[in-house]
Image: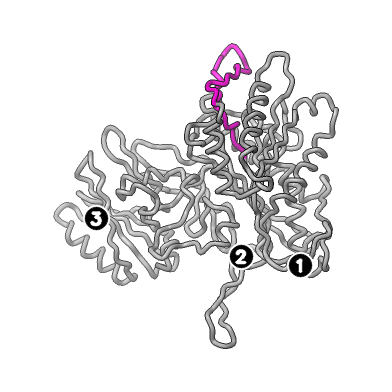
Amino acid sequence: MKDSLGFNKFIMYEGRTRFFVVASSASDSCHRIIKIDRTSQEQLAVVEDEAIYSGRQMTAMLKMLEDGNKSSGGLGKPRVFFGIAGFIKFTAGWYMILITKRSVVALLGGHYVYHCEDTEIIPQVDMTKNFYFSYTYDLTSTLQSNMTSRGRSLDGIRPFNDRYAWNFHLYLAAFGAEDRSTVKGHWLIPLVHGHVDQAKLTVLGRVIYVTLIARRSRYYAGARYLKRGVNDEGNVANEVETEQIVSEALTTPFYYPDRRCASGGRATRRLNPHYTSYVQYRGSIPIYWTQELNSMSPKPPIEISVIDPFYTAASRHFDDLFKRYGAPIMILNLIKRREPQPRESKLLDEYTRCVNYLNQFLPTDKKMVYRAWDMSRAYKEKTQDVISYLEDLAEESIQMTGFFHSGPEPYAHHMYSQTGSLWRDSMLLQNGVCRTNCVDCLDRTNAAQFVFGKRALGHQLYALGVVDNPNLAFDSDAVNMLTEMYHDHGDIHWECTGQQGGNIPAHASLE
């Protein structure tokens, strides 16, 4: 199943009673086919031919199908498209969603990432805004996960993180799957809802690529004001994982070619040391709270709808974060502390009690690091340098969790790093994450995540040996470029949560 992740050409043939869909590898050396029944409105019947065909064999197969369907008009004109986004049932029956237009937005280790530009369905379902996919790279997972795991499984099932695969349920009915482990990987093209951006930076003659990937969770998703807080399973509203990848030599693969030992031993793969990534997380405050829509008030009142003295849902939420990211977890809570009429401050008090309660059950080295800071007041009253304070928090967090670097520190860093620790002679893994929130997880959160990203960028460039100091000036080309990227990153979150508008990371409206 070596080409199971490489099918990126799709052609559909339409018979009177069946659709026939052929998937082909980039080299046209491998082909597979499925048939989709068209005779029943109630039952969705998709049958996959388990065989893998060569080009000549597929040509013979299509000739046989054409002859077999001649009495009903043959197979008709072939339709070329770029992937199946899923199947959905309306009152008139089942429909197939096809990706009909795509554009390249990034290239990571030789793997293309595409933006879904257009889809086709009758009636039309709009999946053309802020959806991204790749045929060969698992866009639903972090770079650290992709480079340190084996990737594809032996049975040809495509590996992916279904939390960020927005079209996952569209596939279940087609293949009779109850969980992702039985979904046929070569037919599933996971669509990530969020944002992908890539920019090029030249530093002292070295070409560096910065890639920003935002993945929005499909669990407990919905428009702002309509979805708030946490549900019983521990999933929170407005959950987004943001990954900042900084790499050199864009077209170089993630792994160097296999080498056999001089003694003829087993071949080994070496990680390409020119990749780094830093992951951040944003999500609604994980307690039960609501904010009712009110056309008469631009700031609807906030209500804590359920009081749970044991914080069961929050416990499930943080258990999941520990499983996904490890420890430690820094909680950066940016909501207001003092208000003429309590709104946000209600959440501050309850969230603080929640974290203190849960921390008493964690070992000392695993306790969550809680940082509550009224960013809006600091910005309005000029009592603190907002950016400098956020940089200090960012540095504290990065020192705690680290970031991912696929190789050792360059020799140019000598035996001791700036922090006084020994020169690192192996890869660096990120263990833990910073979880940031305001009320909407938008302006204030995006401003903070930009500063964290700026601080991480300095460390990433330093780890690659591009700069001699991880402290980047705000007026540098690198930071100006990153500012624009996080500006677009923030705009996308407005769109994804059903709002319109935008923000500027370093100078956001912090109300």
Circles 2 and 3 in contact, beta carbons < 8 Å: no
Q: Quadrant of residue 43?
A: top left
Q: Is residue 70 above or below residue 392?
A: below
Q: Which residues are magenta?
A: 282-308
Which residue is disc 3 drawn over? 75
Q: Report the number of numbered marks.
A: 3
Camera-near label (2 vs 1) is: 1
Give how far apart the Cα atoms at labels 2 and 3 are: 40 Å
Camera-near label (2 vs 3) is: 2
Taking the view exactly as shown, the residue that stands out farthest to the bottom is 263
Which residue is disc 2 drawn over? 251
Q: Is residue 496 magenta?
A: no
Q: Nearer the viewer, residue 341 or 468?
A: 341
The residue at the point 53 percent across, 22 percent down is: 306
Circle 3: residue type? Leu
The percent coordinates of residue 128 (x first, y second) are 48, 41
Q: Is residue 29 above or below residue 219?
A: below
Q: Quadrant of residue 240?
A: top right
Circle 2: residue type? Thr
The percent coordinates of residue 273 (x first, y second) are 67, 66
The disc, 2 or 3, on the residue closer to the chain's N-terminal end is 3
Give the number of the disc on residue 410.
Answer: 1
Camera-near label (1 vs 3) is: 1
The disc, 2 or 1, on the residue closer to the chain's N-terminal end is 2
Q: Secondary structure at mark 3?
A: loop
